[in-house]
Image: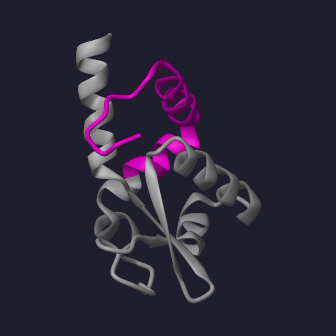
């Protein structure tokens, strides 16, 4: 999918499924303002440009590491977050461009 392309039906379904889980939706809301929601954790890398360490997401969510990893993989496959490795840690941030495309597609297709 190109950076300017609209989402097709399969991609929309995948995004809706990913956001249909309350914990994943909450994580997306937290990632919208990482400084506010993860400020209590010492950052390993810049939260705005690199993202939030998965261990911090796991700690805040209070879920098992395997559950959070699965949730983040689902959000990444749906095109809603981007993953970046920093050393041995994976960091996640929202893909704001893709989220804006999703909002536009919803606004025009539904």
In this view, 29 is above or below 60: above
Q: Position of residue 33 (x, y in %)?
A: 29, 60
- Residue 93: quadrant of the picture: bottom left
Give the residue displayed 39% in from the left and 55% down from the top. Answer: 30
Predominant secondary structure, magenta span: helix
In this view, 109 is above or below 41: above
Q: Does residue 51 appear to the left or right of 72 in the view shown?
A: left
Q: Residue furthest top?
A: 110
- Residue 5: quadrant of the picture: top left
Q: Position of residue 99 (x, y in %)?
A: 32, 41
For the residue pair 99 and 63, the one nearer the viewer reads as 99
Q: Quadrant of the C terminus?
A: top left
Give the residue displayed 49% in from the left and 29% down from the top. Answer: 11
Find out whether residue 25 is within the magenta segment: yes
Q: Position of residue 64 (x, y in %)?
A: 74, 61
In this view, 54 is above or below 75: below
Q: Position of residue 3 (x, y in %)?
A: 30, 45
Find out whether residue 22 is within the magenta segment: yes
In this view, 40 is above or below 5: below
Give the residue displayed 44% in from the left and 46% down from the top. Answer: 80
User: Which portion, as a residue range, is magenta?
Assistant: 1-29
Give the residue displayed 30% in from the left and 13% down from the top. Answer: 109
């Amino acid at each position: 999918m190109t950076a300017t392309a609209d989402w097709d039906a399969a991609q929309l379904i995948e995004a809706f499924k990913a956001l249909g889980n309350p914990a994943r939706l909450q994580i997306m809301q937290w990632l919208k303002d990482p400084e506010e929601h993860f400020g209590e954790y010492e950052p390993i890398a810049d939260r705005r440009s690199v993202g939030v360490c998965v261990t911090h997401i796991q700690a805040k969510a209070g879920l098992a590491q395997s559950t959070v990893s699965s949730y983040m993989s689902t959000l990444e496959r749906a095109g809603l977050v981007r993953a970046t490795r920093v050393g041995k840690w994976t960091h996640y941030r929202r893909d704001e461009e893709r989220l804006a495309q999703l909002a536009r597609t919803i606004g025009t297709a539904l």
